Image (cartoon, rainbow, N blue to C red):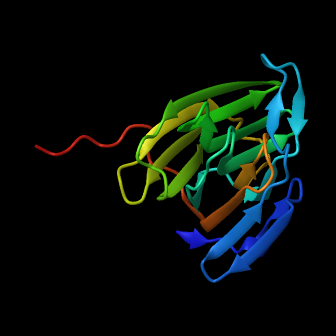
Amino acid sequence: MTDIDWSAGEWSTAPAHVQVADDGMRVSAVEGSDAWRITSYGFIHDNAHALLAPLQQSTAVEVSFELDFSEQFDQAGVFLRVDDSTWIKAGVEVSDGVASLGAVVTRGESDWSLGPVFGWAGRTVTVRASRSGDAVTVRARVDDEEWRLVRVAPLSPEATVTAGPFCCAPSRSGLVVHFTSWRTTEADASLHPEPPVA
């Protein structure tokens, strides 16, 4: 596993403020920042704060952050981008008062999946996106607990992909996300873990 320096990426849209220190990077999101295309809402938002660097085939990116969200649609996690209409964001988002783990997969139009993560508040969340073959596999965990499968989505093996930490604050000003690590490692060996040996 290799740490990625915060200076190695480029912002898709600049946040309101960025502070890098020994314990990570704090990002202040702009009110109204988001990433979404068309489905159900009818609008296109393309101003998420994503710090992106190249993601090669057969590698994974991991992003860790402190879960300290309070307002509707506060969100952070990992972002993978191919182009303006082909991207994935995955992490934790507040929806209707509940912190939930999920993903938005966009191929022209966005889809959205969420599931509540009770007991994760105030803890460190890590989201991993593994690129292998014709897919990206997203997993997440809190602290050192077991990984949870979040999403398996198609992604062309030939695609040029950038990836890294992201945050958005669609509904308010004042969201500050403390990212504690950004790393790359080998992609997960398989979709399903090996069964225990009897």
In which quadrant of the rendered view does residue 88 lie? top right
Q: How many marks?
A: 0
Which quadrant of the structure image shows residue 157? top right
Does residue 83 appear anywhere in the picture?
yes
- As drawn, the residue found furthest toward the top would be 40
Specify whether 190 is left or right of 60.
left
Residue shown at 55% from the left, 51% from the top: 127
6 is higher (above) or lower (below) than 47: below
Decide which of 76, 147 is in the foreground and name it: 76
Location of residue 169 in the rendering, given as x and y in whole percent from the top left corner: 76, 46
Residue depicted at 52% across the width and 55% down the height? 126
- Measured from the top left, where is residue 168 in percent x and y? 76, 47
Q: Is residue 2 above or below residue 71?
A: below
Q: Residue at x 58, y 71 (%)?
A: 2
Q: Is residue 141 left or right of residue 31?
A: left
Residue toward you, 2 or 165: 165
Q: Residue at x 37, y 59 (%)?
A: 144
Counting from the top left corner in percent of width and height, residue 115 is at 50, 31
Describe residue 171's horizontal placement relative to residue 72 as left or right. right
Residue furthest out toward the bottom: 22
User: In the figure, residue 42 lies in which quadrant?
Assistant: top right
Residue 108 position within the rendered picture, expressed as x and y whole percent measured from the top left? 83, 25
In which quadrant of the rendered image does the C terminus lie? top left
Q: Is residue 134 visible?
A: no
Q: Nearer the viewer, residue 41 or 196?
A: 41
